[in-house]
Amino acid sequence: MSALAPASASPAPAPPGSPLDRLAPGGRVDALTGLRFLAALAVFAHHFTGLGGPGSGVARVPAFFPYTTMGVHGVGFFFVLSGFLLAWGYRPGTSARLFYWRRAGRIWPAHLAASLLALVLLFWWGGRTTDAFSVLASVLLVQTWFPGVTPTLPGNSVAWTLSVELFFYALFPLLVRGALALRTRALLAVSAGSLAVMAAVNLWLLTHLSGAAAEWVMRHPLARLPEFGLGLAAALALRRGLRPALRAWPVVAALAAYTVAYTRRAEWAGEGSVVLEATVRPVVAVLAVGLVVACVVRATGGSGRGEGWLASPVMVRLGLWSYAFYLLHQTLNYAITDRWGHQPAGGVALFTMIGTAVVATALAGALYHGLEEPARRWWAARPPRWVTGGGDLRWVRALFLPHRSGGPS
């Protein structure tokens, strides 16, 4: 996706006199790659357990439900991470055409393969209802711009987030240049203000529109732009030398406490529940950027502590597979319910969830090594002349040398 796809190589030093001449190059942070997989796993857990009602998810797992319902906001983490990693790895002088070429090679091969699988399993064999326009919109990743697609999330349902990411990518070359023109304090203030606007708009939507209409607007790419902008602002602030004394464990504790409060929002009286629902996306965005910044501060602080278990070889590999895992997991969940129906809640459901996650991870590894990474390499080695401008291609190919640093980028 995106933030689920491996990031580009570390940025080169800025040329003298450029807006980036005060920026330190953003280096590789493997912990962010491992963190990607945990976020994808949270989204999977939410989709597996659903909302707990009849016909929702594969099965409710009492050991984790209702806390897994917070997993739906894992996509907000990916939007923040996308903005962060694109700005963290931004190379001065890279043309917009080259940037778009790179993005296409990263997201489309795995997306097309996962979409084909979903269309065959769920719509052809499974008999779900759709139409040609909705399928085409999902394949082209413009489905979030149309409220009338069938079903609400057509094709591979989770690909709606890629539609949002595609909008972010289209704006990034412009946004990063505008952000570089601002001082760090002004940049962070603009980002904070956009999150406040996001919360206010969400509150208006929830109190003035029907549930389906409000959800469509809150999924719209324009509505999710503040999350991307927050990540972008944080990355530029860190590259300019800002190093807040932030550790991961207080952020994790705050996230846990907020999850408990959010899952009990039905107990809040009147408007309190609505306000909590309206502010959940901005709050998650702030917590997400806190985790990302804490990982980067630890990795670049020179303390010698390393990046921790998130940067272990196993977690890095799972992080590299996380984009494919994200694309495949909901199709697998749907296939299970189409074939065997919704499973009863209970302890057995936990083993079903673990087994499904293992199968999804194995399939993700196969997709990553069999198609996603080979296709990325092939695409990266063949930028046309209209993309490169006919210059020396050696530096272009260097942009695509495989490495493990995390992010969407």
Image: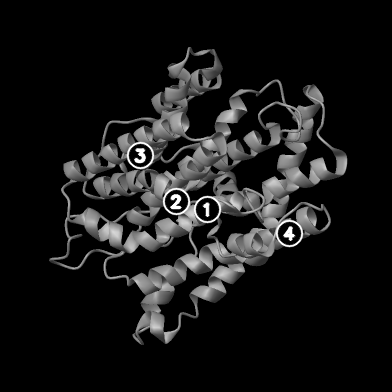
- Mark 4 lies on a secondary structure that is helix
Q: Residue furthest right?
A: 340
Residue 280 spot, x, y in % from top left: 45, 30
Residue 62 spot, x, y in % from top left: 71, 20
The CA distance from mark 4 to mark 2 is 24 Å
Residue type at the position of mark 3: Val
The CA distance from mark 1 to mark 3 is 29 Å
Q: Earlier in the sequence, mark 1 or mark 2?
A: 1
Q: Earlier in the sequence, mark 1 or mark 3?
A: 1
Q: State the mark number for residue 144.
A: 1
| Residue lying at 84% horizontally and 56% vertically, measured from the top left | 125
Q: In this rendering, which labeled residue sits more in front, label 1 or label 3? A: 1
Residue type at the position of mark 2: Pro
Say whether residue 170 is left or right of residue 16. right
Instruction: Look at the numbered discs 4 and 2 and tell me whether their residues touch, using CB distance below 8 Å.
Output: no
What residue did someone put label 3 on? 293
